[in-house]
């Protein structure tokens, strides 16, 4: 595997379900991110982790719960979601949080909440 | 408030017809401006980073430029495979935060 991988690629869940999204980066980076991409809206930053420590929580509802067990893996735990949470969830990584370090994105998980 | 605006929202070109995409930004403390390409159903693919006004970068048919208020992505003699959504993002602060524009959807017809 190379770059940033995400599983599953597609997920359909009911409003009462609990599911998790997984992200793995194979780039040796120290920072990881979760973004939400809704139709016709700009990418929205959700969470930022640096060396497994959360450094940014961009006013995200508590029904989204991130976890970063090590610098290569990032999870997004989902529970009691709403239909408006349906979107493409993108994971990204960068070498560090330093200015100008480009972020590399995974292919995303297409989430549909029914 | 930090803001990024891209124009046009959509652009249709004939193969070989050169054009430019615009990214205007209003931010305090710019740490970098990034261009990405996104194909349908895929994650954004990194293209360029620009750091300061006057800087230019090129890759194949693409050239990115930066001023104090905006960036341009020039596409010279585009081909159908250049069709994609092009995203502009600015980095502010010290926590890796990127603020994205809404993107320009480019379609190049043969």
Image: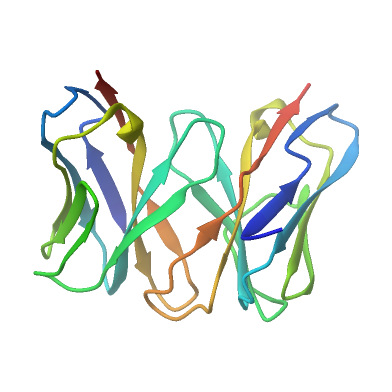
Q: Nearer the viewer, residue B66 or A16?
A: B66
Snapshot colouring: rainbow
Can the viewer see residue A22 in this picture? yes
- Residue A37 placed where, x, y %? 54, 40
Q: What residue is at 71 percent from the left and 26 percent from the top?
A: A83
Furthest residue toward right: A17
- Quarter the C terminus of chain A occupies: top right
Spot occupied by residue A94 in the image (x, y as percentages of width and height): 54, 70
Looking at the image, residue B89 sits to the left or right of residue A107; the answer is: left
Q: Position of residue B59 (x, y in %)?
A: 25, 56
Residue at 50%, 75% (x, y): give it: B95
Instruction: Mark yes or no: residue B102 visible.
Output: no
Instruction: Decide if residue B60 is on the left or right side of residue B34.
Output: left
Q: Name the side, left or right, on which B101 lies relative to A82.
A: left
The one nearer the camera, A90 or A83, is A90
Q: Quadrant of the N terminus of chain A?
A: bottom right
- Quarter of image, res A49: bottom right
Q: Is residue A96 above or below residue A47?
A: below
């Amino acid at each position: 595997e190379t770059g940033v991988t995400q599983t599953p690629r597609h997920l359909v869940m009911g409003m009462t379900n609990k599911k998790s999204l997984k992200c793995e980066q194979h780039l040796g980076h120290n920072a990881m991110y979760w973004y939400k991409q809704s139709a016709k809206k700009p990418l929205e930053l959700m969470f930022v982790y640096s060396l497994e420590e959360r450094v940014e929580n961009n006013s995200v509802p508590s029904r989204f719960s991130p976890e970063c067990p090590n610098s290569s893996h990032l999870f997004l735990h989902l529970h009691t979601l709403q239909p408006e949470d349906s979107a493409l969830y993108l994971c990204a990584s960068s070498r560090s949080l330093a200015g100008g370090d480009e972020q590399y994105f995974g292919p995303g998980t297409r989430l549909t909440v029914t | 408030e930090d803001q990024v605006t891209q124009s046009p929202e959509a652009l249709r070109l004939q193969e070989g017809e050169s054009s430019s995409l615009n990214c205007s930004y209003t931010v305090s403390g710019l740490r970098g401006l990034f261009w990405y390409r996104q194909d349908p159903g895929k994650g954004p693919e990194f293209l360029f980073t620009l750091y300061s006004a006057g800087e230019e970068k090129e890759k194949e048919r693409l050239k990115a430029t930066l001023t104090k208020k905006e960036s341009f992505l020039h596409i010279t003699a585009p081909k159908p495979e250049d069709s994609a959504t092009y995203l502009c993002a600015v980095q502010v602060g010290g926590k890796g935060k990127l603020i994205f524009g809404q993107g320009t959807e480019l379609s190049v017809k043969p």
